[in-house]
Image (cartoon, rainbow, N blue to C red):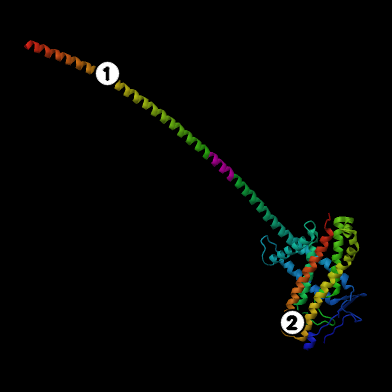
Amino acid sequence: MLAFNFFGATEGGLFDINATLPLMAIQVVALTYILNSLFFKPVGNVVEKREKFVSNNIIEAKNKLSEVKKLEANLLNQLQSARTEAQRIVSEAENESDKLYKEALELANNEANASKEKARLEIESQTSAARDQLSKQADDLSELIVNRLILEK
Amino acid sequence: MLTNFAALEVGQHLYWQIGNIRLHGQVFLTSWILLGALLVFISLGTKKMENDPKGLQNLLEFLWDYIRDLARTQIGEKVYRDWMPFIGTLFLFVFVSNWGGALIPWRLIKLPSGELGAPTADINTTIALALLVSLSYFYAGLSNKGWRYFEYYVHPTPIMLPFKILEDFTKPLSLSFRLFGNILADELVVGVLVFLVPLILPIPVMFLGLFTSAIQALIFATLAAYYIGEAVEEHH
């Protein structure tokens, strides 16, 4: 049957405090030492070793990543400067060739003008010479005609 | 027969007489069985430790991590390492005792007097645990801060002094009676229900009892860690 025997018992009862208390305390302290050497220390060693391993790896990877980023930036820089250098060289060469072209064009123009002028002068002198000759011949011819006419008469 | 099976015996103990001291034998019997099982379990799990945890080792590492988090959040980064084994032992002891008391059908084992049950349903066990916690936080405070530990009693104002002194008595009292009351009440409720309605109805209450048991273990360990953390905390 239900036997509620709370406080009134001569022996026992719920709040019967005796030597169980200190012995239990000693048992728990002993258990603490046993669990420390059997559980907390070995498991802690393994877990902390692994955590250290993982964090070391992460740090190493981060270092490598930053190095890669640095190298990448360096390369980009070099690329940029090479590109501007190339641009400069190209534009310089373009200017040069432009100048050369203009010079050559001017030279050729001048030469052409000069020879044209020369040709014109020559043509002119030959024309005037021819005209002179022609007028002389015309004179001669007219004289001849006149003479013949006079002789006929 | 049935009534005998479901009978409740409250406040009866199996007395062991050694010289002129008397012990509650049933408390020691159950605690030895449960702690033995715990130690076997832990030895099996830590027998072959690998960097790549498998099976039991995984479970034990999870447990270790749980206890470390508990100790670290309550005690603080600086000294939690020193107190982690103690907090962890309290947690494991209370948890194993509570669950062992609730899960194993001790009633099947007949004792000449009293009955087997959760060791934490005996006031001696809970007072022992609570007094250990009190000693621990005094020791933690004194060993970490020396006499400056007593600044805690007049912090933030000296008006707090009587209350802080009173707290040193209420802490172990509340710790021990909370655990004792919860576990005993759970056993009694289940016992009474089994006595009244032996089928089905007690099962939800038993599950509730398992939940309470786990929560009580967590509360006990957390409060112990909190008291230690309070004692080693530096005031500025």
User: Which x, y percent locates residue B147?
Assistant: 90, 56
Q: Is residue B34 left or right of residue B167?
A: left
- Residue A23 in magenta stretch: no
- Hey, which quadrant is residue B100 in on the image? bottom right
Marks 2 and 1 share the same chain: no
User: Which x, y percent locates residue B75?
Assistant: 79, 60
Of all residues, the one furthest to the bottom in this rendering is B1
Is the stretch drawn in magenta largely helix, strand or loop?
helix
Q: Nearer the viewer, residue B4 or B73?
A: B73
| Residue designated by label 2 | B202
- Residue A83 seen by the camera: yes
Of circles 2 and 1, the one toward us is 1
Q: Amino acid at mark 1?
A: Ser
Q: Residue at x 60, y 47 (%)?
A: A69
Pointer 2 chain: B
- Hey, which quadrant is residue B20 in on the image? bottom right
Q: Amino acid at mark 2?
A: Pro
User: Which x, y percent locates residue B163?
Assistant: 89, 64
Q: Residue at x 86, y 55 (%)?
A: B145
Q: Which secondary structure, mark 1? A: helix
Numbered range of the magenta stretch: A72-82
Q: Which secondary structure, mark 2? A: helix
Of all residues, the one furthest to the left in this rendering is A153
| Residue designated by label 1 | A125
